Image (spheres, rainbow, N blue to C red):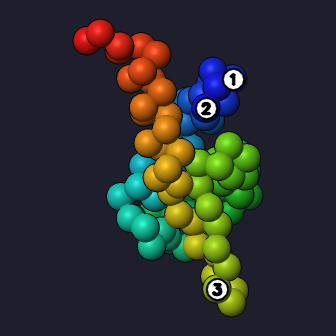
Amino acid sequence: MNDEQLAKCLAELGNITRLRIFKLLIKAGKKGLPVGAIQKSLDIPASTLSHHLSKLLSQNLIHKNRAGTIQNCIANYDILDTVVDELKEKCCSGV
């Protein structure tokens, strides 16, 4: 991951609503959560949630799977690990 990609990921997570969504999906584990459950848990209007999910999807921070009429969102743990590793490598080398 280059610095531009890292900055974009961090920028998306710098929004409090997107950070809450991402944290909720991390807690949900590899099964993820249906969009409706995210909306209910965080009390976010559907159109607002859609906007924030789109931003997280754009940086590959989450994945969406569809099972019938249910859209399930899953945190991308590989990207999370990469972001954390990049920060450690670039900011904390020698610590």
Depth check, front residue: 12 or 4: 4
Q: Earlier in the sequence, mark 3 or mark 1?
A: 1
Gap in angstroms between the C-alphas marked 3 and 1: 34 Å
Residue closest to the eye, 25 or 85: 85
Q: CA distance from mark 2 to mark 1?
A: 8 Å
The residue wearing badge 2 is 1
Q: Report which residue position mark 1 lands on.
A: 4
Eyeballing the image, is 95 above or below 42? above
- Name the kind of residue labelled 2 in the image: Met
Residue 86 seen in the figure: yes
Identify which residue is drawn at 42% across, 13% down: 91
Q: Residues within 10 Å of mark 1 (few under 14, many from 20)?
A: few
SS for dot 1? helix
Q: Position of residue 28 (x, y in %)?
A: 39, 64
| Residue 67's disc number | 3
Task: Say which quarter of the image contains residue 89.
Answer: top left
Measured in 3D between alpha carbons, the distance from the residue under mark 3 to the one under mark 2, in whole angstroms, is: 31 Å
* Placement of the C terminus among the 4 image quadrants: top left
Q: Amino acid at mark 1?
A: Glu
